[in-house]
Image (cartoon, rainbow, N blue to C red):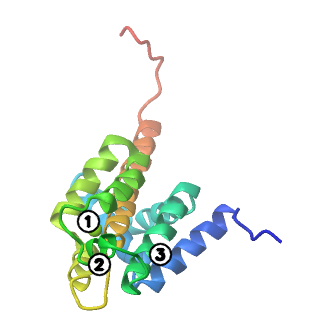
Amino acid sequence: MKKKVLFSREEMARLCVEALKSRGVEIDEIAKIAYQQQARYTSNIRFETCRESVLKILSLRDIFHHVLLAVELDRMAEQKLFRGPIQDIIEQDLGLFGVDEVLGLDVARLYGVIGMTNFGDIDVNKHGIVSRLNEDGKKEGIVHTFLDDIVGAIAAAASTRVAQVINEDIAHEEPHKAISLFD
Ligand code: MG
């Protein structure tokens, strides 16, 4: 019998949370990066909106596939399951290896150019847990080559979503008047 490959959004979010937890990453730590990043640009951000944004993003099928794949690639490299040079390249997190960033960018691009630039900021400045993952990944037996990017990208997407949510609220608050394209 074929195994189940289609999951509901609720199941996908739960499985992502479990996969990240199995690699030592809590949702609140991702939400914290989103909060700190967006707080630089927008006031009145609620931590709960950041948390909710992370969970919304984790419930999307594409993101679910990216998260599970990233987690497995690191775990497989830790167990030395790849053959040839790619095992050492992933294990040593070679600076010139960019496929981990490609997966991250693919997640961040869910929220357009702003999502991608926010990911660049987290990738370069290593906010919060991304810095910890990066440092731990240098230790013997631990591989975080894909995890740090996927976590940074989820935080970037969540941070951008929060900005979208807040701006949508502001748009609704502003007094309604007939708007013409040619005013
Ligand atoms: Mg990486």
Q: Position of residue 102 (x, y in %)?
A: 34, 54
Q: Dot 3 lies on which element?
A: helix
Ligand 1 appears in which quadrant? Answer: bottom left
Whole-angstrom CA distance, mark 2 to mark 1, is 30 Å
Q: Residue furthest front?
A: 84
Q: Secondary structure at mark 1?
A: helix
| Amino acid type at image mark 3 | Glu
Left or right of 41, for residue 104: right
Left or right: where does residue 135 sit relative to residue 18?
left
Label tally: 3
Residue at point 28%, 56% (across, down):
119
Kind of residue indicated by mark 2: Glu
Residue 36, numbered circle? 1
**Mark 3 vs 2, N-terminal side:** 3
Residue 178, above or below 161: above
Residue 136 appears in the picture as rendered: yes
Position above or below: 153 against 170: below
Q: Secondary structure at mark 2?
A: helix
* C-alpha gap between disc 3 and disc 1: 28 Å
Q: Quadrant of residue 98?
A: bottom left
Indicate the amino acid at tag 1: Gln
Residue 91, disc: 2
- Label 2, residues with CA under 10 Å away: few <14, some 14-19, many ≥20: many
Which residue is the site of mark 3?
72
Q: Position of residue 85 (x, y in %)?
A: 29, 71
